[in-house]
Amino acid sequence: MPETLTPIISSRKVRGRVYVDRNRCKGCGFCIEFCPPKVLSFSASFNEHGYHSPELVRPEGCTGCDLCGLYCPDFAIFAVREPRPVPSAERGASET
């Protein structure tokens, strides 16, 4: 991955993860507008071109659907679905 891609993660259990290339973003807001669970917002900081890039404000609500990435005209954001961890009780039962 390019060095400018920064994962936006949380310590909470999440279903999706969003990656933003802050320096590709021109601040159009399409990703924020079309996010179904409304988990994105404009950052208070500026990128190197003077635009506000998106940030994940409710990581627990991200589904990893990647609509943010599909609507981004500059390919500056994308989301991925994270596999849910298998509880140890289920893992032990499947191994026998």
Image (spheres, rainbow, N blue to C red):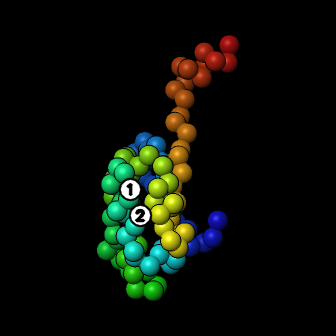
How far across and how far down the image is residue 21, in percent?
52, 71
x 50%, y 71%: residue? 73
Amino acid found under the numbered disc labelled 1: Cys
Spatial separation of the CA atoms under disc 1 and disc 2: 6 Å
Neighbours of disc 1 within 10 Å: few (<14), some (14-19), many (20+): some
x 52%, y 73%: residue? 74
Establish if 48 lies above or below 78: below
In this rendering, does residue 23 appear at all? yes
In this rendering, does residue 7 appear at all? no
Tell me whether the residue at label 1 lies in contact with that at label 2, contact meaning CB atoms closer than 8 angstroms: yes
Q: Which residue is mark 1?
A: 35
Classify mark 2: helix, strand or loop.
Answer: helix
How far across and how far down the image is residue 88, in percent?
55, 24
Quarter of the figure that contains the C terminus: top right
Q: Nearer the viewer, residue 29 or 1?
A: 29
In this rendering, the count of numbered labels is: 2
Amino acid found under the numbered disc labelled 2: Cys
x 36%, y 63%: residue? 32
How far across and how far down the image is residue 27, in percent?
40, 76
The quarter holding residue 90 reads top right
Point out which mark residue 64 bears: none
Point out which mark residue 31 bears: 2
